[in-house]
Image: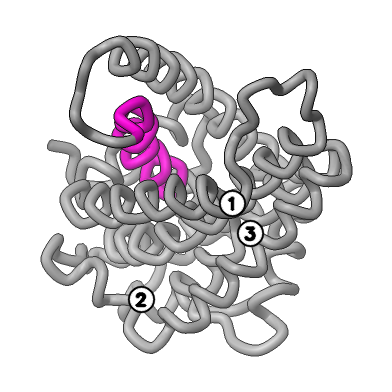
Amino acid sequence: METELPLRPMTVGELLDASVVLLRRGWPPLVALGLVLALGQQALVGLVAPMPDQVWTDPAGFWAWLGVWLGTESTAIAILGAPASVAAAGVVAGEPVGRRTLLTAPGRRWPATLGLAVLVGAVAVGGAFACGLPWLVAYGAAGLLVPVLIADRATGGQVIARPLVLLGRGGCRAGGIRLLGYFGWLAVRLAVGIGAQQLLGELPLPVPFAGAIGWVVVDALAYPALACLDACLHVENRMRTEGLDLALATTTGPRRAVLEAIR
């Protein structure tokens, strides 16, 4: 198994590979939390805005479902961003966090993470209701929020301002790659989810909502993978725009102090 992430600016392909490496490092707690969030998402969406049987005859119902779905999945990815950022920061600092403590490592930052996740979800809902284009901008821009909170240990207004500054310094490259990763996983999710829904829907299973099983399983993997991509994007963006890799290579002190420095 790979032991470290590249400590240098990476290509798009290397970033996607790095996110998979990070997921492989901490997959048990990440996928377990992803499963809980995917189950909660299915239940909440089904309760608040179920998918209409006839989309074309109920466009309002479809947009309500889509908005709630995009909002809840954005919230889930942001929540998973906390342990993913802990894992990425540990690798970069040379202090990998054990799988058993990955979910508890954010510590007192969990309440702030949950607050940010709800904010991200609310913005995603609003973007979806505004016919979709604002959602693309919001999703691309929101990826660095939780990594900055957890990996950089930002406080106060820096939690919102610093991610936007980092995104701008990088020419919004991180946002574009985040969207690329999202749509790549969306293709996988649609293939698995729709295929499983068609298959399980035809079987006489004594389980309510059996058709949703495929969606839950693939989302339980996709959401942690996208959160790991966010964490890798943040670290790589700092290397590209702030010279984090050079600072880490030349420091004689703890790497953690360099990683957490706010510029």
> Is residue 100 positioned above or below 214 on the image?
below
Residue for point 30% across, 46% down: 22
Q: Which image quarter is the C terminus in?
A: bottom right
Q: Which residues are magenta?
A: 209-228
Query: Which structural element holds mark 2?
Result: helix
Amino acid identity at mark 3: Gly
Does residue 253 appear to the left or right of 71 in the view shown?
left
Residue beneath disc 2: 256
- What's the distance in space between the residues labelled 3 and 2, CA to CA? 30 Å
**Magenta stretch: includes residue 173:** no
First of labels 3, 2 by sequence position = 3
Mark 3 residue crowding within 10 angstroms, few (<14) / some (14–19) / many (20+): many
Among the 4 quarters of the image, the one containing residue 169: bottom right
- Percent x, y of residue 101: 17, 71
Residue beneath disc 1: 237
- Percent x, y of residue 256: 36, 76
> Is residue 28 positioned above or below 209 on the image?
below
Does residue 4 appear to the left or right of 195 in the view shown?
left
> Could you tell me if the residues under marks 3 and 2 are in contact, i.e. CB atoms within 8 Å?
no
- Percent x, y of residue 153: 49, 80
Residue toward you, 216 or 244: 216
- What's the distance in space between the residues labelled 1 and 3, CA to CA? 23 Å
Residue beneath disc 3: 121
- What's the distance in space between the residues labelled 1 and 2, CA to CA? 17 Å
- Percent x, y of residue 70: 63, 44
Observer-side mark, 1 or 3, equals 3
Is residue 89 visible in the rendered image? The answer is: yes
Amino acid identity at mark 1: Asn
Observer-side mark, 3 or 2, equals 3
Query: Which structural element holds mark 3?
Result: helix
First of labels 1, 2 by sequence position = 1
